[in-house]
Image (cartoon, rainbow, N blue to C red):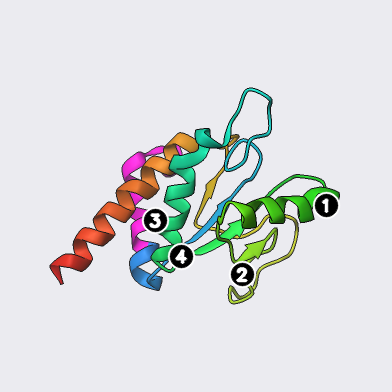
Amino acid sequence: MSRYLSYEITFNRLKEEWLKYGKIIVAYDVDSTVLPFHDHESEDDYKVIHNLIHELNDLNCTLIVFTAAEERRWDGIKEKLKKINLPYHYFNQSPPEIPGLVTNGKVYANIYLDDRASLYASVDLLQKLIHEIKNTETVK
């Protein structure tokens, strides 16, 4: 069994990366993760994710929009993100400060927020991590 099927091991890895670098890199998807894609969805459905992204930004995390949307939609997506004031540092690209990365389509991140990739688990891990980091900082 993969060691990363363990919640505790996955959480500790993420926490160690945060403590080592003073931040983490979070990639987030757009459709049905931070913006409505289907008719039955509304922007209110994403308030928890929006708040989490703002909190990560306030804690100096690097934020990457990582979408499989067609390139012809990118300008519209960027406009929508600007309109709802959702921060990001890179759009479909890895941070240039990470050495040795191959640009093969997958961006580098410590964790991904995506409706197609265990969004609930990722949100839970990040909320727990933020809570611990904030409590650690207030103890210092």
The image's mark for residue 95 is: 2
The image's mark for residue 124 is: none
Q: Which residue is mark 4?
A: 61
Which of the two discs, 3 and 4, labels the residue nearer the N terminus?
Answer: 3
Q: Nearer the viewer, mark 2 or mark 1?
A: 1
Which of the two discs, 1 and 3, labels the residue nearer the N terminus?
Answer: 3
Q: Residues within 10 Å of mark 3 (few under 14, many from 20)?
A: some
Q: CA distance from mark 3 to mark 4?
A: 12 Å
Q: Which residues are magenta?
A: 1-16
Which of the two discs, 2 and 1, labels the residue nearer the N terminus?
Answer: 1
Q: Are marks 4 and 1 in contact (CB under 8 Å)?
A: no
Q: Which secondary structure lies at badge 4?
A: loop
- Of 107 and 60, nearer the camera is 60
Q: Could you tell me the amino acid type at mark 1? A: Glu
Q: Which residue is mark 3?
A: 14
- Of 99 and 50, nearer the camera is 50
131 left or right of 58? left
Q: Is residue 118 visible?
A: no
Which of the two discs, 4 and 1, labels the residue nearer the N terminus?
Answer: 4
Name the residue located 68 percent from the left edge and 60 percent from the top edge: 91
Name the residue located 37 percent from the left edge and 71 percent from the top edge: 22
Q: Could you tell me the amino acid type at mark 4? A: Cys
Q: Is residue 17 visible?
A: yes
Name the residue located 68 percent from the left edge and 33 percent from the top edge: 37
Q: Are marks 2 and 3 in contact (CB under 8 Å)?
A: no
Q: CA distance from mark 1 to mark 3?
A: 31 Å
Q: Which residue is mark 1?
A: 71
Q: CA distance from mark 2 to mark 3?
A: 18 Å
